[in-house]
Each structure stands twice: as structure tokens, then as C-alpha cells.
Amino acid sequence: SRSLIPVEDGLAECDVLFRPTWAPLFIAGSGDAALEAPPGAGYHLPAGTQLVTQLHLLNTTSATVSDAATVTMREHEPGEDERIGIFSFGTTDIDIPANATSQVENDCTVDKGVEIFAWLPHMHYLGTSITLEVGMSSDSMQEAYRLDPWDFDDQIVDPVPVSLAAGMHTRTTCSYDNPTDTPVGFGESSFDEMCFLVGFATGVTQDLDGCLNLIRADQPMPVP
């Protein structure tokens, strides 16, 4: 992420999932991931930009785990003037019944044209598949992206281009299988659930935009 306000350099333990003062640049999940920008596009990081690298960890054992995470970038080339941003889809309105399969949908109309060149789908352990449908009306939508099956331990950045015009209707669908005796809702833990389809795009005017429903079934989404 690009920090919008100065923070102290160095390592620190996170007390929140994400801060509104962090403008995300790249997001990946468990497993290796690579993002190849289209010709002429790149991240714009002026001199003095402060970057925040955040790592989410889950240790289910009683032993100490030691590992490393590396982010590799290359220098901007002449002519790479188009800006990369994130255009995301999804919802936090999740309520998965116990001992059942179910789906969560989010319908949204795109308010600007955007060219998405890669996707990062994101759910947790109960997720089974995720799809995106698009169309000029809610009655004419066709599938534009699908990841089936979903594998939490191998979260890929998928280079599938999708062109969206302003006014297009979209529907993001996350499918789940909950074999437990407890309902599961949205949450930060890997044992809660999420439904996000992160698009890496050109044609965006800000770092983070999209078609998101960030209201939970029981309460407004908390702001850190």
C-alpha cells in the first residue's frame, strides 16, 4: 500500500485488518503471485512515497513458525504512463447457514469505464467458487470470469482481461460449503468468510475503487 499520511519506518504488529490511510497497490494471498502490467502501464510512485507492506499470518500449530515474504518490483520504463489501480467487487453481507451449501451475491452498476487485466479472487476456507457476470442490463448478463474450484491455499493472480463500460451491470457470486454446526459470517479470521474479487485495472483515477457492498447483515462495516 501507499501510505497517505507519514508513519514511522520499521516493523510493527498490526492492530487492524486495514487502515483507510493506506491506498492499496498490490494484494495477494497464500502462495506465489505475479502481476504483469499491460504495455504502457505501471504504478506511479513519486520520490518520497512511503510504502506499507502488510502480512497476514495464521499459525494453527503449537510450534513457532519462521518464514519470509518477498515483494519484487522493477523500475518504471519510459512510456509506461498509464496508471494501474484496483477496481474491486464483492460484499461483506455474508451469512452462511450451518451444515449447508449457499451463495452470496452482490449486484452493482459500474459508474465508469475500466479495463481490468488481472484478478485476485478472495474467500476463506469455506469458499468453493467465485464468478462475475456482466451485461448492459440485469436481464442480459453473461459470465465474464469464473474460478472453480477455489483453493484457499493457492490464491492466484489470474490474468483474465475484462472490459467494462460505464453503466454496465455486474453480479459477483461467491459459493460456500459449510460442513460445521455453526453459521459463519464476514470476518477477518480465516475461519470467518469473505467475498471479494479484486481487479487490477487501467483507466482508474484513484488507487482503490469498485463495486462493493461494505454493509454487513447485522451492522455497518466498522471503520478503523
Image (spheres, rainbow, N blue to C red):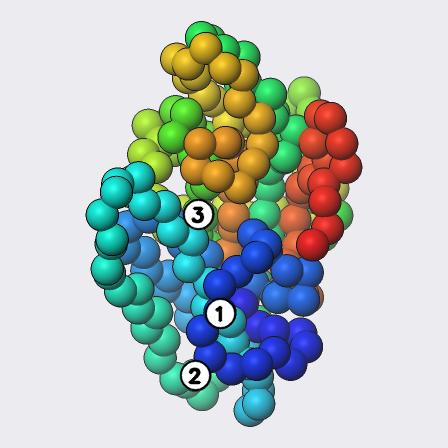
Q: Nearest the camera: 28 or 35?
A: 28
Q: Residue furthest front?
A: 62
What residue does disc 1 label? Answer: 12
Q: Is residue 82 left or right of residue 214?
A: left
Neighbourhood count class around disc 2 (C-alpha, 10 Å): few under 14, some 14–19, many 20 upward: some
Circles 3 and 1: CB distance less than 8 Å? no
Query: Which mark identifies residue 120?
Result: 3
Q: Quadrant of residue 73?
A: bottom left
Q: Nearer the viewer, mark 3 or mark 1?
A: 1
* Side (left or right) of 131 relative to 110: left
Where is residue 195 drawn, in percent x and y?
A: 54, 34
Tag nearer the camera, 2 or 3 = 3
Above or below — where is 92 with respect to 38?
above
Q: Is residue 117 visible?
A: yes
Q: Earlier in the sequence, mark 2 or mark 3?
A: 2
Q: Check disc 2 and report the residue beneath it.
A: 76
Point out residue 204 in the picture as x, y percentages from the top left corner. Answer: 64, 62
Q: Which of the two residues, 11 or 110, is positioned nearer the viewer here? A: 11
The three-letter amino acid code for the residue at tag 2 is His
Quadrant housing the N terminus: bottom right
Q: Quadrant of the C terminus?
A: bottom right
